[in-house]
Amino acid sequence: MVGGGHAGVEAALVAARMGCRTLLITGQQSAIAKMPCNPSIGGLAKSHLVVELDALGGEMGINADLCGFQFKTLNASRGPAVRATRVQCDKRQYTRRMQQVIAAAPNLTVLEDEVTAIVIDQGVVHGVECADHGTVSALTVILTTGTALRGRIHIGEEVTAGSGDDRPAADALAISLQNAGFELIRLKTGTPPRLLATSIAWEKTLIQPGEEPPPFFSIQTKCSTWNIPGPWKPGSDQIPCWLTHTNEQTHAIIRDNLSRSSLYGGSITGTGVRYCPSIEDKVVKFTEAMRHHVFLEPEGREPDAMIYPAGLSNSLPRDVQRDMVRSVAGLEEAEFLADGYAIEYDSVDARELRHTLESLRIRHLYLAGQVNGTTGYEEAAAQGFMAGANAALQVQGREPFTLSRQDAYIGVLIDDLVTKGTNEPYRMFTSRAERRLILRQDNARYRLIEQAERLGVAPLVCRAQTRDYARQIEEELERLRHVRQEGVPALTLLARPEMRYDLLHERREDLPDAVIDQIETRIKYQGYIAQEERAAARAKDEEAVVIPDWLDYHAVTSLRFESREKLMRVRPENLGQASRIPGVNPADIAVLSLIIKRGHL
Amino acid sequence: MDEKCYSTHVIAAIATAAGPAGVSIVRVSGDGALEVGDRLVPGLRCPPSQRAAGTFFHARVIHPVTGTVIDDAVFLIYRAPHSYTGEDTLEIQGHGGALPSRRLLEAVLAAGARLAEPGEFTRRAFLNGRMDLTQAEAVCDLIQSRTERAAHVARAQLDGALGGRVAALYEAVTAVCAEVEHLLDFDEGELPPLFTERASERLAACMTEMEQLVASWREGHLVREGALVVLAGRPNAGKSSLMNALLGIRRAIVHDLPGTTRDAIEESLVLYGVPLRLVDTAGLRDTQDGVEREGVERARAMIRQADLILYLVDGSVPQSEKLAEVCATLPTGRVMVVVTKCDLPTSGTLEIPSELAYMRVSAKSGEGLEALKRMVAETLGVTEETYGQPIVSLRHVNELRTALEQSREARAALDAGESGLVLAAGHLRGAAEALGRMIGRVYTEDLLDAIFSRFCVGK
């Protein structure tokens, strides 16, 4: 394991829990599981990833639940398919607890050193080269380098090497990857300045309270019989966030100093996140907007904690940042604890990977997280888990573990990355999933139970409860099929939008709320769910058409030249994946399909 | 999978239409097509396989086995990938007419080519990336079309008239979908004012366009498959006589004995360029005769499917039925009353419901026949003016219907506001995908089957 961020942590934990001797090498042991950007876990679509990860046995969900101090449900009025959870976390506690879990994990050792190269022999990776400890050999290597590869921090005209949050950059490893034949692309992300909580005039801002009862991510937190030590009782004593807005003056300051911003001054070449733009971007691109949201999010419980002003990410010079921030209502006296900055880093083209996140080029080498072009803790953690699990299966000589787009958001994420690649930091969205109504957050534990059982790292008690609940859901649905109330079938009644299970005369009083929620959702969306399940089955058929090894795209002259190039680059595993490659049009797929059916070139 | 469908074996076929003509063309395509040509012109200093692409020459064609002179012909050389099929291709232009072209083809087959399957040139063109699905489909229709007119329509599709309209719809629906998706993925709290109303309005505009295209299906279907025109009426109303008169031959057995026609008889007829499937049915009456009863049942089934029903009434005998009542049982808007035997003296008054068109004819004297033919063509809605309108295929109309249905559902979901957004997005996606499948922007396996099942691809 190279790297101890959110991807590295999940990868190391799952591999160790699956019984592999695992070494986690990080440049800075104290930085393991740090949250260098926003202090929250989850959010739209991202929370789907966290919950799926939790169902499979990942650590992020439970860690956020235990260290969270504000819990919210997003998109609550828009139905279960897009409903999501966001948890504001105490950054210090989050990092500390995760480090404790790592320290306590059997089979897992942490080594503080800089990895300078990967050791490759005849297309197979055999270990890594470290700056202090020399060569460390391994059967598999997982790279989760985040923003470290040739990381450059930009604040106005200043440029320094680093991977953010005072961690070192990894230039040597970038060169090693390049020498191994990887094409590196330059990406950019950024973070706002940090402000001192006691310097903010809260009365000028709008309070954003948490939700009671708190919505948790993890099955472990929800299992009442389960008691995991954390900094406080999960969900207790929630503290609020605050909302304020930029104004015309803020925008004027930014416009006047655009030439001094790293982004617009020209020193940054990497592509930024379209969906999480810097404030310079917003002012330049949305000229008609009079104001933009600024959420003030505490990074910890203590009164003098840092405040993360979400929405003010920028790469302006230090003095301009101060003027700009202090023009916002409530922030007039704001004291800076850290400056905002933009960071540029190298990532690989994820189309060089398989669905297991193993490199197509170098066997037994896995890559996960930001190095694959994603942004976000959750996206990183999901990939880390999948890479770790597959590396472990590889070592143990077992079948690889992949999730399809029809199974999970994790499947959508990885399929998008390895099929389409990305030229800007990739963030998860619900619209990226074709089967949103069956890939809900609320049913993640049920749809992934088989996979969780196979990996065997999710706590036994959770898996047992999932099986038990699943059985209760089926039994109750079956019973309801025969129940009528005033002549109307119970299932018809429950399909009405306003109808609740609790209002049925013949309800059962002994069912857990989680079971009742599932029953209500399944009945209300019955038609849609059935339709998506049929579509999913069709898509799986297409995914079952494996592209055979003898299919040499070079030789298929009937494919357009661009298609041939794209297909050779991605090397899709099946027809379904091939059809999603941008630039490969339906007619090309039709040609492939006919050739595969024919059985020869 | 049929192996021969795919091999690049040299295939050949007569490329020109059958019938008297000045020139007939035999097209030869595949790996070795030019070598096949070599064997047809033995002793030529520069045989076809040595010649450059885009050149032509004149030579005497000799049968490679019998050695007899076949024809004087012009040879055109195409080399891969610059030909219709994308393969090496030879076009041999010989003298026109059925016999000379058949002899030429026979010689080509003797020289090592195999007779092409229906649509095989096109399938190869498609496989070699020379045309997209829409174009391949149009060519396929062209080959199968019964009439000149259908060929025109298929050609219009080739040029993308339909493709352009559907592409615009696809873009429009996708744009609405993108806005809804955007809203779902950014939790900014409230909906922008009038968001759902505007989305719904834009969708409604798309639906109007889709409806227009669906409406043109009727014409498309009439042109492609022939309009089903059913002759119906009481026994002995003169259905078989009229059928024979329209066809100008004696096809149906005509007899004064009521119930002579016990099964449906179908004949093809082209009326003003519109192919008709003219069906004579058993007279409608309650009967104890098992065979006849079966015939009556089939007649009723035909009536249900008919594009136009000519309901015949014998004008020479008193009516035993109330015409208005009978016509009420027939599909509305598709009935025309024909009063037959108008050469005989009329018997009393005939009450014809005012909303129905009617004609008087005599199969015997020919009176009113021309007028009837004109009226049938007009009622079917195919006139000279409708020439060249986009006419959609069965697959197209089904996709359009899906898109319409999905759009309708999407609007209903949008009306529900916030809680309906996810469902609306799903339906919008469904609508966009259906449109995308029409123009080859969206791929699914069944799509391929739908198009190429008419060729010998797949089973």
Image (spheres, coloured by chain):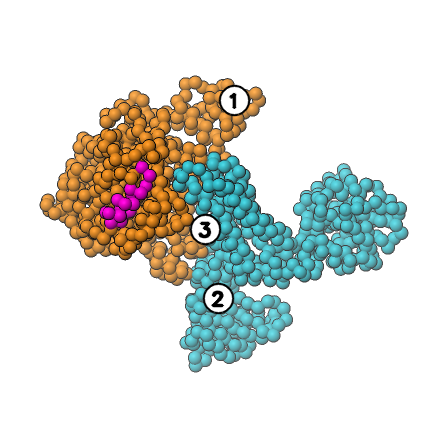
Residue under pointer 2: B84
Q: CA distance from mark 3 to mark 2?
A: 24 Å
Residue B443 x %, y %: 45, 51
Determine the residue positioned at 26% across, 41% down: A37
As shown in the figure, which amino acid type bears the numbered disc 2?
Tyr
Q: Which mark is residue A483?
A: 1
Chain B painted colour: cyan
Determine the residue positioned at 79% across, 51% down: B358
Q: Which residues are magenta?
A: A313-330
Instruction: Indicate the chain on which mark 3 is placed.
Output: B
Q: CA distance from mark 2 to mark 1?
A: 66 Å
Q: CA distance from mark 1 to mark 3?
A: 43 Å
Q: Quick check: A268 left or right of B38?
A: left
Residue A478 in the image: above or below residue B111: above
Residue B76 x %, y %: 49, 74
Label 3 Cα neighbours within 10 Å, binned few <14 / some 14-19 / many ≥20: many
